[in-house]
Image (cartoon, rainbow, N blue to C red):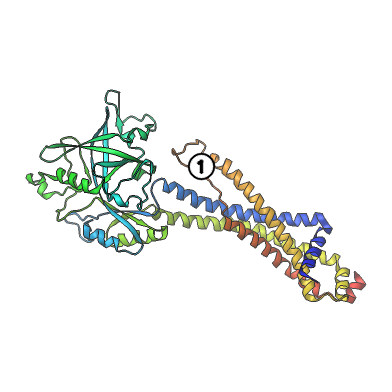
């Protein structure tokens, strides 16, 4: 008997008892849908957390700060972000790009509006590699000097002094249009310890598309110009005996006429506020971030938080998947019961097949084909039901979990259930395998039937 003939005969035999077959298939449908939906909830949890964290920072970017020891503190090692340290970090396997950064803050004017901005100096040629992107305009290039790229929320740092403004009073989310800054001039005012003032005119050539807290509120400029600004700010700091004992960190928050010195430590050579390190994948990010901390740097990445979330999701999936597996196990028992009942009803037919020359192999594969078809049908319809349930969960479950409906501007709708292609393939193969395994006992029972006894009692 050909394989095709076996499949046709198996399909025909299944539908002799339509009610019983439908109920058996229904059990597989429920079991398959249970496993898929349960696992999809765990997958959705991880993916939604990833997207949420990406709104706060890239998973492939590490922010490195220097570590400080204070006088009288024992243990540890002081690590400063010098050019030597940048070269050391660049040599770590998996680092694809690194840029030192200098921060300078001060009062700025934009048209008739005033405000405060944080200016960050980076290597302009590395912005794209460091995952900066613009919604309008362009990124910086090597030829830029006083051109800058503004974050999408920088516009909300400015207000009209003629209008009533209380920075301590909550007036709702900022609503400024970032495009107001594009191709406009920002006037940044800096002061140094000699009470001197200098104004820098900065041209905004691009608006960042990122909404992350780290980038949306900052203005980015070539690091070469930030070095000059920092040197100006530091002028005169040796004139004060108190400042000879204090080190002004490169992250300087300036208010007019009041320079703010920071952490105690002698300045030996040029140091940076922080460094941005780019990796190729999340695995490298975690490894390099840990290695930098082991080297006594302060390193942080959003990927550091992902490991705990993934571990919790794996436990969540194991529990829910186990519940679904129990349901499918009950369905497997139903398949076995259906096939055994089929053998009792078809003993005479089995005996005739043996008499006319059907081999044990053909009889075994006939019953295995029937049980596998039950698994295939149940798995296919179960996957379809899973997509339906997933859609309902995503549509109504998200609003149930977030009844206020509040979301960050520009953020995507939460998907609490996600069914990737690999899960579809796994569920289908698993249901077919369950059907195949459930048919082994009935198939072996069928081939052990004695033809003469079967003909007598069939």
* Quadrant (top left, top right, bottom left, bottom right) of the C terminus: bottom right
Residue 286 coordinates in the image, percent (x, y): 38, 59
| Residue with the most extreme right position | 456
| Marker count (numbered) | 1
Foreground residue, 140 or 341? 140
Q: Which residue is mark 1?
A: 413
Q: Is residue 324 visible?
A: yes
Residue 228 coordinates in the image, percent (x, y): 18, 46
Using the image, determine if residue 399 lies above or below residue 47. Answer: above
Q: Residue at x 22, y 55 (%)?
A: 68
Foreground residue, 166 or 86? 86
Q: Residue at x 92, y 73 (%)?
A: 456
Residue 58 coordinates in the image, percent (x, y): 39, 50
| Residue with the most extreme front position | 143
Residue 338 as seen in the image, left or right of residue 278: right
Q: Residue at x 68, y 57 (%)?
A: 379
Give the quadrant of residue 174: top left
Using the image, determine if residue 19 lies above or below residue 351. Answer: above
Residue 89 as seen in the image, left or right of residue 135: left
Residue 345 as seen in the image, left or right of residue 432: right
Q: Is residue 167 visible?
A: no
Q: Residues within 10 Å of mark 1 (few under 14, many from 20)?
A: some
Residue 186 coordinates in the image, percent (x, y): 26, 35
**Mark 1, secondary structure of its residue:** loop
* Quadrant (top left, top right, bottom left, bottom right) of the N terminus: bottom right
Give the quadrant of residue 89: bottom left
Using the image, determine if residue 16 lies above or below residue 173. Answer: below
């Amino acid at each position: 008997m050909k394989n095709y003939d076996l499949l046709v005969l198996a399909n025909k035999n299944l539908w002799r008892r339509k009610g019983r077959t439908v109920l058996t298939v229904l059990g597989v449908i429920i079991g398959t849908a249970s496993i898929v939906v349960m696992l999809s909830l765990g997958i959705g949890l991880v993916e939604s957390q990833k997207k949420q964290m990406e709104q706060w920072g890239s998973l492939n970017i590490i922010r490195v700060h220097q570590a400080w020891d204070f006088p009288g503190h024992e243990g540890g090692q002081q690590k400063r972000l010098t050019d030597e340290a940048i070269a050391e970090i660049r040599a770590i396997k998996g680092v694809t790009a690194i840029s030192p950064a200098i921060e300078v803050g001060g009062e700025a004017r934009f048209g008739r509006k005033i405000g405060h901005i944080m200016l960050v100096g980076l290597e302009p040629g590395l912005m794209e590699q460091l995952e900066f992107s613009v919604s309008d305009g362009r990124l910086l290039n090597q030829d830029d000097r006083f051109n800058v790229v503004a974050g999408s929320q920088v516009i909300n740092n400015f207000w009209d002094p003629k209008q009533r403004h209380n920075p301590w009073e909550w007036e709702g989310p900022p609503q400024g249009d970032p495009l107001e800054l594009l191709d406009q001039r920002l006037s940044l005012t800096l002061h140094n310890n000699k009470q001197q003032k200098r104004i820098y005119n900065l041209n905004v050539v691009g608006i960042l598309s990122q909404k992350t807290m780290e980038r949306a509120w900052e203005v980015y400029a070539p690091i070469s110009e930030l070095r000059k600004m920092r040197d100006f700010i530091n002028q005169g700091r040796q004139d004060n005996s108190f400042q000879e004992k204090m080190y002004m960190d490169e992250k300087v928050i300036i208010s007019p006429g009041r320079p703010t010195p920071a952490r105690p430590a002698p300045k030996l050579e040029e140091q940076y506020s922080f460094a941005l390190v780019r990796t190729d994948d999340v695995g490298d990010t975690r490894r390099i971030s840990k290695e930098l901390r082991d080297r006594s740097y302060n390193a942080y990445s959003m990927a550091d938080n992902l490991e705990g979330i993934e571990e919790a999701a794996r436990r969540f999936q194991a529990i829910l998947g186990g519940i679904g597996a129990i349901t499918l196990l009950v369905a497997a028992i139903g398949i076995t019961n259906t096939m055994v009942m089929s053998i009792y009803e078809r003993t005479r037919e089995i005996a005739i097949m043996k008499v006319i020359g059907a081999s044990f192999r053909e009889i075994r594969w006939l019953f295995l084909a029937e049980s596998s078809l039950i698994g295939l049908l149940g798995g296919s319809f179960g996957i379809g039901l899973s997509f339906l349930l997933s859609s309902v969960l995503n549509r109504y479950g998200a609003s149930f979990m977030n009844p206020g409906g509040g979301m960050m501007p520009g953020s995507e709708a939460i998907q609490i259930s996600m069914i990737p292609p690999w899960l579809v393939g796994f569920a289908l193969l698993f249901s077919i395998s369950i059907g195949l395994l459930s048919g082994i006992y009935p198939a072996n029972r069928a081939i052990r039937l004695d033809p003469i006894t079967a003909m007598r009692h069939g």
